[in-house]
Image (cartoon, helix red, strand yellow):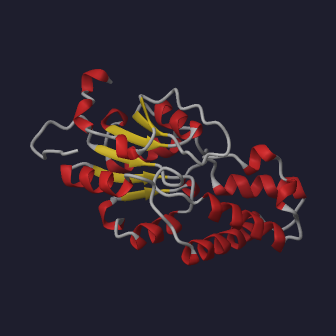
Amino acid sequence: MPLNRSSPRPFAVALFDFDETMIDLERQHDAAHRALCRAMGSDYDEMPESFRFGSGRRIIDDVRDMKAHFGWTAGTPRLEAVRHRAFLDECRRGDLRLMDGVERLVRELHAYGLRLAITTSAAGDAVDEILRRFGLRELFELIVDGSEVTHGKPDPEGYLLTARRLGVRPRECIVFEDSERGVGAAKAAGMFCVAVRNPRARTHQDLSGADVVLTSLRDFQSITAFSPKER
C-alpha cells in the first residue's frame, strides 16, 4: 500500500466475501451441483441457465431450488450433505488459487491493525479449510456463513450479524465483494463497499451500487483514502 499502523484508521474491520472475491471456486461449485444431481438421478443441465450461472446465493437455497425443480423427496439436510462432500472432495484435489492481490491485501490490512472477518454464502468449514491451506486462517477473527442467517444476500442479515458479533458499528466496516447480491447486502447494512469485478463471471453483475469498483484487488491502493467524512 504501504500502510502505517500509526496513521488514522477510517475503518475498524474489513469484511470479505469468499467465493470469487478471495478465490475462484466456480468450477468446484458447479461440479458439486452436478454430483448431487447425478446422485439423485437428475441432469443438472436441466436447471435454468439463470440458476446455473448465478452468483452470491446461499448453498442451502441452491439445494432447495434443485429439490423443488426436480421433485426430489429426500430431505434437504441429506441433499446438502451429499453436495457438501462432493464440494470438499473437489476442493481437496483441485489446484486452488487465490484471486489476484488477495493475499497481499489481507496481510497488509491485518498488519495495519484492522480486524478481519468473512461473511459468506458458502459453508464455513470449507472456508476454514481453504484459508488454512493458504496459511491465512489465523488472520481472520470470524467466519459467518450462510447457515447462520435466515436470509441470504442481498439481504443485509449476514453483514449485520458479523458486525454485531465483532461489536462494531456498520459504518466502521469496509466490505470486499464481487457480486451484485453481495454489494446490495453490504450497502443495505450501511457499510462501505469495494466491489471487485470477476472476469470469469458467467452473468453480468451490476456493481454500480458499490462505493468503489476495481478490476482487481491489486488495484486497491490505500484504505486511508476513505475518510469517515466521505461516508
Q: What residue sits 88% from the left and 55% below the top?
A: 46
Q: Is residue 195 left or right of residue 9?
A: right
**119 relative to 86 in the view: left or right:** left
In the rendered image of this protein, does residue 64 appear above or below residue 185?
below
User: Residue 138 placed where, x, y %?
Assistant: 31, 66
Q: Quadrant of residue 172?
A: top left
Depth check, front residue: 39 or 163: 39
Residue 154 appears in view:
no
Question: Number of callouts in the render?
Answer: 0
Q: Residue furthest left?
A: 6
Q: What residue is shown at x 61% (from left), y 46% (from top)?
A: 201
Q: Quadrant of the C terminus?
A: top left
Nearest the eye: 147 or 92: 92
Examine the image and state in which quarter residue 82 appears.
bottom right
Specify whether residue 61 is in view. yes
The residue closer to the viewer here, 201 or 157, is 201
Rendered image quadrant of residue 137: bottom left
In the displayed image of the protein, which residue is found farthest to the top? Answer: 229
Residue 210 at x, y percent in the picture: 47, 30
What residue sits 83% from the left and 52% below the top?
47
Q: Is residue 206 left or right of residue 39?
A: left
Task: Tell me the residue at 28%/39% (across/down).
Answer: 221
Q: Position of residue 9 (x, y in %)?
A: 19, 38
Q: Position of residue 217 (x, y in %)?
A: 39, 45
Which of the image's four quarters has the N terminus? Answer: top left
Front residue (pair 92, 186): 92
